[in-house]
Image: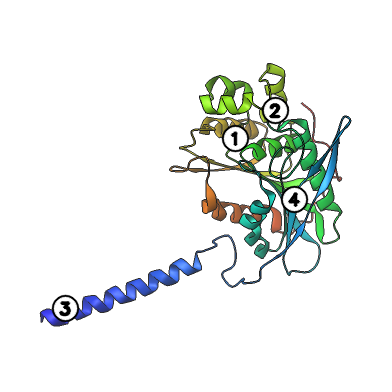
């Protein structure tokens, strides 16, 4: 009897392990189709911007999947590290959803030239010009554009959202959105990092604060991602922005990770994939905003 019980347990264990292995393979890239095995083509996406009398070279790459036609497109503004090539490799699997993806390094990050001024106007100008280039591509639908900003990139994406109404969807991840409030409470390491890049005057902090420039109305859908254990950018920053957007009647969703730190990694793939399917990839008969038209002013 004992032998039969042991044999049954062994069979049950083997079936459990086999099922678990299959489960892990299916969920390797939860934001994309498990059947997709085509690697997208990666091409340079580089350009120059002008700031006063200076010209900066912006490094970037675009991932192009096999799907034909004019597809939605998303611009990714990388934060920590700022390497555009690593960025595009990290997100290229989202092309399986049926979209184009571009990553750029903001001025002073990665291989982009120019001073790293803790985001600032040149970073927003670079993001806006990248969006211009994406919208002008013959394989991109200019009525379905999105921006995804991570860390410092989330600040630039938020400021772009404040002044440019072309985006249908905006994803803001692990950012600081009210720098006037953040600066007094920032950890010492974060303060030193900011001091190395810009003098934190009230004017400079206000210039970089997303909540200070929010328009009265926002037509885009917004997803805010943040780790509850983020010690660099406290979650209160994300919560404050979400409240400010809700007060303006914006379509805002939040996804907070109870055990998430500043670097959320691939755990964001599921909420990002679902958000893009609903708000960017779905067809719409609504008349798109004019290309490059600014949002409503405060």
**Considering the numbered disc 1 on the image, is that residue within a helix, a strand or a loop?**
helix
Q: Can you identify the residue that label 2 sits on?
A: 208
Q: CA distance from mark 1 to mark 4?
A: 30 Å
**Percent x, y for residue 261?**
48, 41
**Considering the numbered disc 3 on the image, is that residue within a helix, a strand or a loop?**
helix
**Left or right of 271 on screen, residue 70:** right
Front label number (1 vs 3): 3
Front label number (3 vs 4): 4
**Percent x, y for residue 127?**
76, 42
Q: CA distance from mark 3 to mark 4?
A: 61 Å
> Which mark, by number, is residue 5?
3
Binning the other alpha carbons within 10 Å of mark 1 as few (below 14), some (14 to 19) or many (20 upward) gives: many
Q: CA distance from mark 2 to mark 1?
A: 17 Å
Q: Earlier in the sequence, mark 2 or mark 1?
A: 2
Q: Nearer the viewer, residue 233 or 110?
A: 110
Number of numbered discs visible in the structure rendering: 4
- Residue 20 visible in the current orientation: yes
Whether 278 is drawn above or below 184: the answer is: below
Q: Earlier in the sequence, mark 1 or mark 4?
A: 4
**Left or right of 77 on screen, residue 4:** left
Q: Quadrant of the N terminus?
A: bottom left
């Amino acid at each position: 009897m004992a032998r039969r019980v042991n044999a049954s347990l062994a069979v049950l264990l083997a079936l459990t392990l086999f099922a678990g292995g299959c489960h892990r393979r299916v969920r390797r890239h939860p934001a994309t189709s498990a059947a997709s095995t085509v690697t997208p083509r990666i091409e340079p996406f580089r350009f120059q911007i002008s700031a006063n009398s200076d010209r900066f070279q912006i490094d970037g790459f675009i991932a192009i999947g096999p799907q034909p036609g004019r597809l939605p497109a998303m611009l990714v503004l990388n934060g920590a590290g700022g390497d555009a090539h690593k960025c595009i490799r990290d997100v290229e699997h989202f092309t399986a959803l049926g979209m184009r993806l571009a990553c750029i390094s903001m001025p002073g990050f990665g291989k982009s030239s120019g001073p790293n001024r803790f985001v600032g106007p040149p970073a927003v100008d670079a993001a806006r010009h990248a969006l211009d280039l994406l919208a002008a591509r013959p394989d991109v639908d200019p009525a379905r554009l999105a921006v995804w900003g991570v860390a410092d990139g989330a600040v630039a994406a938020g400021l772009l959202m404040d002044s440019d109404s072309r985006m249908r969807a905006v994803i803001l991840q692990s950012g600081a959105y009210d720098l006037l409030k953040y600066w007094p409470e920032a950890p010492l390491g974060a303060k030193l990092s900011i001091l190395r890049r810009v003098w934190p005057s009230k004017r400079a902090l206000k210039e970089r604060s997303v909540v200070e420039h929010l328009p009265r109305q926002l037509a885009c859908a917004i997803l805010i991602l943040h780790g509850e254990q983020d010690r660099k950018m406290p979650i209160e920053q994300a919560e404050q922005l979400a409240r400010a957007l809700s007060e303006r009647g914006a379509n805002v969703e939040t996804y907070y990770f109870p055990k998430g730190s500043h670097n959320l990694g691939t755990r964001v793939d599921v909420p990002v994939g679902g958000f893009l399917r609903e708000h960017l990839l779905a067809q719409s008969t609504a008349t798109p905003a004019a290309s490059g038209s600014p949002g409503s002013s405060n």
